[in-house]
Image (spheres, coloured by chain):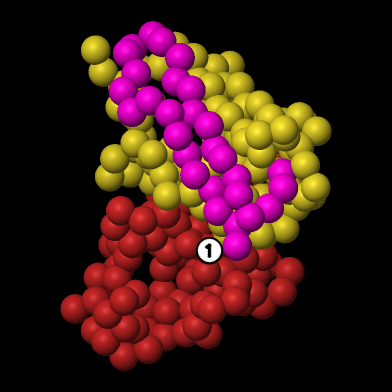
Chain colours: A yellow, B red
Amino acid sequence: QLQLQESGPGLVRPSETLSLTCSVSGGSISSSNYYWAWIRQPPGKGLEWIGSIYYSGNTYYSPSLKSRVTISVDTSKNQFSLKISSVTAADTAVYYCARPLRSTAAQGYDSWGQGTLVTVSS
Amino acid sequence: QSALTQPASVSGSPGQSITISCSATSSAVGDYNYVSWYQQHPGKAPKLIIYDFINRPSNRPSGVPDRFSASKSGNTASLTISGLQAEDEAAYYCSSYTDGSTPVFGTGTKVTVL
């Protein structure tokens, strides 16, 4: 059974870089035809799609975050990662990693990590 | 990228049917190739309950009851929950996607079972 687990610091200082990793078990990132995604949710608010990556490294980013976001993949560790630079309090959110039902976001995301809360504060 | 507007809250009594709307703000929902719906209980990750219903009626992942159904009329997509149950109390989000673009989520609707 596929499992995704987010990990990383729960507190990030303003203007610094947020870094998270999603570890995948029960399936191989490199042998599957999926665009793995990061999605976030500010406390008490709605969902926001951040971006996605294919095992080859091909990426798509949200236009509103593109200038600050980098998503990378490490197939040897079966992980993919998120970096958001120059963070502000507005980046405080629960961050989820997710896998779509089919290859892309077209059919939605049916596998999710439990989410990790990242707070941006000095 | 335009957001999808949903009512902030919808309520109903057990056994009733409720409908949650999802409207595009600056472009037609009809422009989107794919629309999906998610259910999210407090403190939990979202759960996909309907996917790709533009092309096929009410696709539901395994285990999702057929009480959940979806439809689209003009620029508005809708989720209907029939035979409302206590466990249906949750937040619901629509999401749309177009080939060559990026996914967009709706503003979310809190469903209360009275």
Q: Is residue A77 left or right of residue A41?
A: right
The residue at the point 29 percent across, 57 percent down is B42
The residue that label 1 is drawn on is B48
| Residue B10 image-quadrant placement | bottom left
Chain on which label 1 sits: B
The extreme top residue here reads A15
Mark 1 surroundings: few (<14), some (14-19) or many (≥20) residues within 10 A: many
Camera-nearest residue between B18 and B85:
B85
Give the position of the N terminus of chain B as an image quadrant: top right
Position in image of residue A66 (x %, y %): 60, 22
Q: Going 33% across and 62% down the picture, which residue do you hit?
A: B41
Q: Is residue A108 above or below residue B17?
A: above
Q: Label 1 sits on what residue type? A: Leu
- Residue A16 shows in the view: yes
Q: Specify the quadrant that holds the C terminus of chain B.
A: bottom left
A73 and A78: which is toward the camera = A78
Query: Is residue A117 shown in magenta?
Result: no
* Image x and y of residue A91, in percent: 38, 26
Query: Left or right: A66 with respect to A74?
Result: left
Residue B31 percent across, percent down from the top left: 69, 52
Residue at the location (55% across, 74% down)? Answer: B70
Residue A65 vs residue B80, the one in the foreground: A65
Whole-percent x, y for residue B6 in the image: 41, 56
Give the magenta part as a residue range.
A1-29
